[in-house]
Image: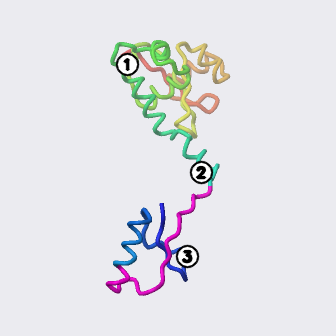
Amino acid sequence: MYAVKTIDQRHKVLATGDEPELHRLVLAKYQHGEWQFPVVIEPEQAQPWDDKEYLASMRPDPETEEREQIKEIRHAHRAGKHTIRALTDETGYITKRVSYLVHKYSLPLRNEYWRAEKYNDPNEIITGQTVDLLGDKIGAPARSIRQASYSNGIVCGYYISRVPKV
């Protein structure tokens, strides 16, 4: 590839293409008086390689990745998988990720479970099939979790709720 550039301003590219075509273009423009200034046909230089820019373009977009994951989870949900464990087995994602996406996108589950939502960060959600399991995850006794679920209270910085069977 070649480029037609002005002689006094080498950075200003007027046209690009193959050399014979550009030669005809330069002659036609010069004869018609459109380009009255001197021009030169030069081979185009390869752009310098930028590793940081290349690596940034290779990283997957987190939003796109999340959309693909919830798409697979919804597909499994439509296929009859209505528990977090079944969705995890079907999709191959880790339980924490499936649980997070199920709650973020409000997919109805058919089993009863306990849910803890962080007080100052609604995106941080912890779930457990039993009150004891949830208590182990957030580091609180089962009795205080059960009591907080009746009064919509807070335990260890989490809103506690019990999600009934659908």
In the rendering, at what x and y percent does residue 90 appear?
Answer: 45, 14
Q: Amino acid at mark 3?
A: Arg
79 to the left or right of 121:
left
Q: Main secondary structure of the magenta part?
A: loop
Residue positioned 51% across, 28% down in the render: 100
> Label 1: which residue?
77
Q: CA distance from mark 1 to mark 3?
A: 61 Å
Q: Nearer the viewer, residue 58 or 32?
A: 32
Q: CA distance from mark 2 to mark 3?
A: 26 Å
Q: CA distance from mark 1 to mark 2?
A: 38 Å
Residue positioned 38% across, 78% down in the render: 27
Q: Nearer the viewer, residue 47 or 163?
A: 47
Residue positioned 48% across, 64% down in the render: 2
> Label 2: which residue?
53
Q: Amino acid at mark 1?
A: His
Q: Which residues are magenta?
A: 29-48
User: Which mark is first along the chain, 3 or 1?
Assistant: 3
158 to the left or right of 75:
right
Residue 155 in the image: above or below residue 14: above
Label 1 residue SS: helix
Q: Is residue 123 magenta?
A: no
Q: Amino acid at mark 2?
A: Glu
User: Which mark is first along the chain, 2 or 1?
Assistant: 2
Residue 38 in the image: above or below residue 121: below
Residue positioned 47% across, 39% down in the render: 63
Disc 3 packing (10 Å; few <14; some 14–19; many ≥20): few
> Label 3: which residue?
10
The circle on residue 68 is none
